[in-house]
Image (tube, rainbow, N blue to C red):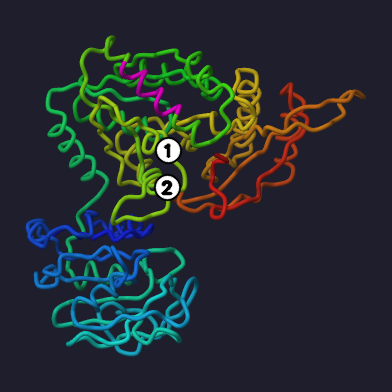
Amino acid sequence: MSTRILILDFGSQYTQLIARRIRELHVYSDIVRFDTPASVVASLRPAGIILSGGPSSVYGKGAPLPDARIFELGIPILGICYGLQLMGKFLGGEVEKSDRREYGHGEIEVVKPCALFAGLPKKIAVWNSHGDHLTKLPKGFVTFAKTANAPQAAIGDAKRNLYGIQFHPEVVHTPKGQKIISNFVLKVAKAKPDWTMVSFIDQTCAEIRKTVGKEKVILGLSGGVDSSVAAALIHKAIGKQLECIFVDNGLLRKGERAKVEEVFGKHLKLKLHTVDASAVFLRKLKGVTDPEKKRKIIGGEFIRVFEQAKKKVGQAKFLAQGTLYPDVIESVAIAGNPAALIKSHHNVGGLPKDMKFKLVEPLRQLFKDEVREVGDKLGLPKEIVWRHPFPGPGLGVRCLAPIEKRNLDILREADAIVIQEMKSSGWYEKVWQAFAVLLPCRSVGVMGDERTYDYTVVVRVVQSQDGMTANWVHLPHDLLGRISSRIINEVRGVNRVAYDISSKPPATIEWE
């Protein structure tokens, strides 16, 4: 029995969610390019193949297309949305533009029993996102479900274990979607559910050792969840070959430097070098207001610092980063994966082209909650594993006012108050992220019968599962009142506090 499901990526922003749902079934999954040769697919011996969705039309110029021979391998295949249309096109069916595009919430009606819908009701709420639909079935296929606008909402050839669905089962908006994925993975493909975070750790450590050999690895340690877990994982794999560098770039949270040096240097006994580069970062950021320029400057300067640090740690060929999948999908648009660029992340889109390191990114295929689970398995302190996410560019993308020490100090103090009040009220562990943002605008206020003209701080608190979507949190009014009162009274330079009630989408979690 095979233990792997292979996902061919045709550019959907949901592709990694498919992998995530499969991993939740304790089945290992790989994401590969859409045009991976059938011979390579066969050599990987997957139990099943999933064709992801995508924004293209199967008849569009430059549309990503698979190797047609994958349909001849005898391996069970599930096509999702664009994947269904590909299956129809390649196997003799016909796909046409719909008169009415289906996007958002919908409902399918199961018209014929099949393995995909085993244990499910005849009517199922689903999430649609398509403009084309199948109008003629391939030979040997039958219709299993329909919608009001798509007569072929689910099709299949049970003899060949080939199935296609026009909706997205991987998103939370399809409540029974995980059952459909489970039916394909466990019942149709008969994959073996033996993959866990422990097995991920073992496999990743083996891959790191194979990639790195006896070379040194440098890791930029920020103290955040991602870099901390990456450090612990790589340290488990190669021990003292890992050299951690903590860069004080002047964009850190209050007390960050002391905490990192204590936890990682003294407690975990990692080889830690602290570099104070705050003056350089602040000088290069002076007068810069464009968010993309900020991120690229910060990312580029990080690499320069690492290259200079080689003189202290010795020759190193590899740079390790705590890059996660949401970072990648927001930052990168590549051929065959035309996901729209949302913003560059310093450890993805902000890296200079002349970088002299090879990258090691052991967490690149994981979401935040999975990273936390890895951290728990590795024995990291709870205060590190369950810290709220902190952006790589640090306060540089939370300080919308001019980047200078005084404004950063204002933001640091306000942010510390937000975190203190969230923790003391018991709300910190209930939410995904809570932080302060310093706006570039000032307004008139009255303090002690005197006129003030000071900055505004925005408090941002959101709930999320993986960072891909997020909802603003309805905090108790008395808690918001305490946060506002403390910031205005204790932080010199602020006379107004606002609360951000925007969700993602349409807003992003960070302001820049």
Which of the 4 image quarters holds residue 76? bottom left
Q: Residues within 10 Å of mark 1 (few under 14, many from 20)?
A: many
Point out which mark residue 158 bears. Answer: none
Q: Return the residue at label 2.
A: 330
Residue drawn at point x = 28 percent, y = 56 percent: 336
Side of 439 where 281 appears, left or right = left
Does residue 44 belong to the magenta stretch? no
In the rendering, at what x and y percent does residue 278 appear? 49, 16
Quadrant for the N terminus, please.
Answer: bottom left
Q: How crowded is mark 2: few (under 14 residues within 10 Å), some or many (20 or more)?
A: some
Q: Nearer the viewer, residue 218 or 297?
A: 297
Q: Is the magenta stretch mostly helix, strand or loop?
A: helix
Say what amino acid the circle numbered 2 marks. Answer: Glu
Q: Give the range drawn in magenta.
A: 297-307
Residue drawn 39% across the image and 23% down it: 302
- State the image coordinates of residue 44 (x, y, percent, origin top left): 10, 56
- The span from disc 2 to disc 1 (Cα, nearest Å) is 8 Å
Identified at 41% across, 16% down, the residue is 261
Asked whether 276 or 184 is in front, the reply is: 276
User: In the displayed structure, does residue 434 sit left or right of residue 26?
Assistant: right
Where does residue 486 sit, x and y in percent of width and height?
73, 29
Does residue 211 appear to the left or right of 292 in the view shown?
A: left
> Looking at the picture, which amino acid does disc 1 mark?
His
Q: Which quadrant, please, contains the C terminus? A: top right
Asked if the residues shown at circle 2 and circle 1 are in contact, with their CB atoms under 8 angstroms apart, the answer is: yes
Label 1 sits on residue: 345
